[in-house]
Amino acid sequence: MAASDGFSWRRHFRHPVFGCLGFRPIVAQHTRAEDEALGRWAKGRKHIIEIGVAEGASALKLRQSMAPDGVLTLIDPFNLSRFRPLNTTRRLAQSVVGHCSNGRVVWIEEFSSHAARIWTGEIDLLFIDGDHNEDAVLQDWKDWHGFVAPGGLVVFHDARLFARGWVTPQYGPVKVVDALFRTKTHPDWEIAEEVDSLVAVKRQM
């Protein structure tokens, strides 16, 4: 169909079912530079958590890059489906992440606040990309950063304005990162790197 017809693959095939059927690729919610950064930060790490999986693009990158004996824990309630037994977003994400055999994957289909109540393990990379409401992002930080080991990273998505980007100052992750790490300092944490909308903070001790 000609471009003049106004046809858009993203508009007409955006529902996850079309990804499951192979009519479109998975929708990555991060830039190429962010994809490369996630791979670099995950390289060799053994205990990785991602909060907010969507169609699994970033989870796949994390799995591909982590240590061969690593464990990737993916937390998402997949609660937006109208019929949970046929949740196409969940099915698509599981299929995408399953295409890689590196390490091991654990799925937790719960809200991150619920999962944190029973979590006991150490983390060396935490990727916060769930509910972008300011209170929710701050709660994820409060619930999970205490599990991060010295030298470990917490990465916030959509937390920084960048050229030709989509992020605005009203985004919850922007407000949280600005409040926690730009307007005041934490003796045990510092901003380690920023790539497009990603902000990675490192635990010092």
Image (cartoon, rainbow, N blue to C red):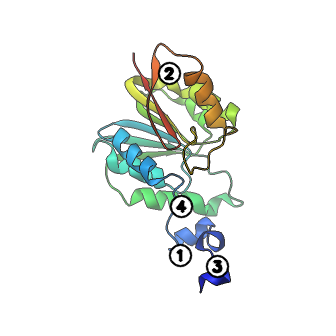
Q: Given contact means CB atoms under 8 Å apart, are the residues at marks 3 and 1 in contact?
A: no
In this rendering, the answer to whether 164 lies above or below 122 is below
Residue behind mark 2: 146
Residue at image position (43%, 56%) is 97
Q: Given contact means CB atoms under 8 Å apart, are the residues at marks 4 and 1 in contact?
A: no
Q: CA distance from mark 4 to mark 2?
A: 31 Å
Query: Residue 67: percent from the left, percent from the top?
Result: 29, 41
Residue behind mark 3: 7
Q: Nearer the viewer, mark 4 or mark 1?
A: 4
Residue 175 as seen in the image, left or right of residue 157: right
Q: Earlier in the sequence, mark 4 or mark 2?
A: 4
- Three-letter amino acid code of the residue under disc 3: Phe
Report the quarter where the N terminus lies: bottom right
- Three-letter amino acid code of the residue under disc 4: Val
- Three-letter amino acid code of the residue under disc 2: Gly
In this rendering, the answer to whether 153 lies above or below 75 is above
Q: Nearer the viewer, residue 182 or 54?
A: 182
Point out which mark residue 23 bears.
1
Q: CA distance from mark 3 to mark 2?
A: 48 Å
Residue behind mark 4: 27
Point out which mark residue 82 bears.
none
Q: CA distance from mark 3 to mark 1?
A: 15 Å
